[in-house]
Image (cartoon, rainbow, N blue to C red):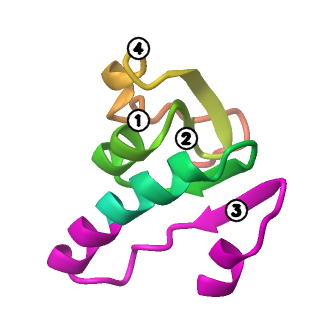
């Protein structure tokens, strides 16, 4: 991760970078990420997470997905009502 953050790139993809860390370290790195992301200028940062609070804290635009489908995309203030995925509905290909 350090190599990716050190390089000046047009796009940066971080796929759940805090997933395997303890809670205290996660909190510290979230604060550090806020600063790093704001200092990156024109770089597009794509940050994936399963933690809604983390997405709301770090993202300017939050994209909510469920089962590979985009449910909502909005500035973080307007997407806070999408914290829970919709109730599961069987598709025509699902067998009992």
| Residue 89 screen position, x and y as percent | 50, 31
| Residue 92 screen position, x and y as percent | 71, 33
Q: Nearer the viewer, mark 4 or mark 2?
A: 4
Query: Considering depth in this image, is 91 or 13 the residue closer to the camera?
Result: 13
| Residue 79 screen position, x and y as percent | 42, 21
Q: If you read the primary sequence from the N terminus, does the residue marked by circle 3 or circle 4 appear first? A: 3
Segment tinted magenta in the rendering: 1-29
Q: Nearer the viewer, mark 4 or mark 1?
A: 4
Q: Provide the secondary structure element on which disc 3 rests.
A: strand
At a point 67% along the width and 45% down the height, the residue shown is 41
Is 6 left or right of 24, judged from the image as shown? right
Label 2 vs label 3: CA separation? 19 Å
Mark 1, residues whose alpha carbon is within 10 Å: few (<14), some, or many (≥20)? few
Residue pointed to by mark 3: 13
Residue pointed to by mark 2: 66
Q: Provide the secondary structure element on which disc 1 rests.
A: loop
Residue pointed to by mark 1: 85
Is 60 left or right of 54, judged from the image as shown? right
Q: Are marks 1 and 2 in contact (CB under 8 Å)?
A: yes
Q: If you read the primary sequence from the N terminus, does the residue marked by circle 4 or circle 1 appear first? A: 4
| Residue 33 screen position, x and y as percent | 43, 61
At a point 37% along the width and 83% down the height, the residue shown is 20
Is 40 left or right of 12, judged from the image as shown? left
Give the quarter of the image for residue 30: bottom left
Q: If you read the primary sequence from the N terminus, does the residue marked by circle 1 or circle 2 appear first? A: 2
Numbered tag placed on residue 78 in the rendering? 4
């Amino acid at each position: 991760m350090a190599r990716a953050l050190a390089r000046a790139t047009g796009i940066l993809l971080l796929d759940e970078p805090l997933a395997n860390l303890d809670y205290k370290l996660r909190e510290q790195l979230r604060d550090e990420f806020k600063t790093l992301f704001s200092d990156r200028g024109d770089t597009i940062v794509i940050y994936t997470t399963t933690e809604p609070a983390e997405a709301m804290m770090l993202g300017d635009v939050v994209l909510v997905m469920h089962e590979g489908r985009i449910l909502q995309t909005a500035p973080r203030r307007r997407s806070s009502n999408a914290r829970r995925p919709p109730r599961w509905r069987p598709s025509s290909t699902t067998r009992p």
